[in-house]
Image (cartoon, rainbow, N blue to C red):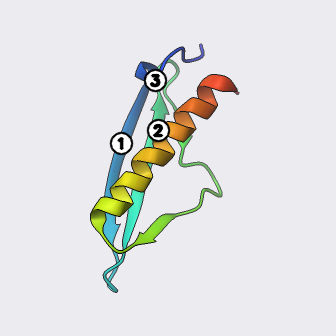
Amino acid sequence: MYAESPDDYAVYLTASRTAGGQFFGRLEVVRKTDGKTIYPYDGALEIGPFATVEEARRSATNLGGMVIDADLKHPE
């Protein structure tokens, strides 16, 4: 069963900090209709590095929206 709206997805995001003080966004997008994790996938690039945690989270949020839009337009 395919998703029909953004409400059909669960998005989990956070950020992590490296020893060097840079931040990386962490994102997981799950399609609720079938429980499939659609992000991250094998080969997905890291989200970052960024100078601030806010930038890392904002980038992860934006990517999550793009992943959802792409899945709604072209479900697998």
Q: Is residue 52 visible?
A: yes
Q: Earlier in the sequence, mark 2 or mark 3?
A: 3
The residue labelled by disc 2 is 29
> Is there CB contact under 8 Å for labels 2 and 1?
yes
- CA separation in Å, label 2 and label 1: 6 Å
Picture residue at 60% right of the left edge, 24% below the top? 72
Q: Is residue 21 left or right of residue 47?
A: left
| The disc label shown at residue 6, or none | 3
Image height check: is 34 above or below 27? above
Q: Position of residue 47 (x, y in %)?
A: 48, 61
Residue 9's image quarter? top left
- CA separation in Å, label 3 and label 1: 14 Å
Q: Position of residue 63 (x, y in %)?
A: 50, 47
Image height check: is 52 above or below 41? below
**Label 3 CA crowd tier, 10 Å (few <14, some 14–19, many 20+):** some
Q: Identify which amino acid the numbered label 3 is placed on.
A: Pro
Q: Position of residue 15 (x, y in %)?
A: 32, 60
Q: Marks 2 and 3: which is nearer the front?
A: 3
Q: Position of residue 31 (x, y in %)?
A: 50, 27
Q: Nearer the viewer, residue 70 or 11?
A: 70
Image height check: is 41 above or below 5? below
Q: Identify which amino acid the numbered label 1 is placed on.
A: Tyr
Q: Earlier in the sequence, mark 3 or mark 1?
A: 3
The residue labelled by disc 1 is 12
Picture residue at 49% right of the left edge, 17% below the top? 5
Q: How many marks?
A: 3
Q: Identify which amino acid the numbered label 2 is placed on.
A: Val
**Label 2 CA crowd tier, 10 Å (few <14, some 14–19, many 20+):** many
Q: Earlier in the sequence, mark 2 or mark 1?
A: 1
Image height check: is 22 above or below 63? below
Q: Is residue 75 left or right of residue 68?
A: right
- CA separation in Å, label 2 and label 3: 11 Å
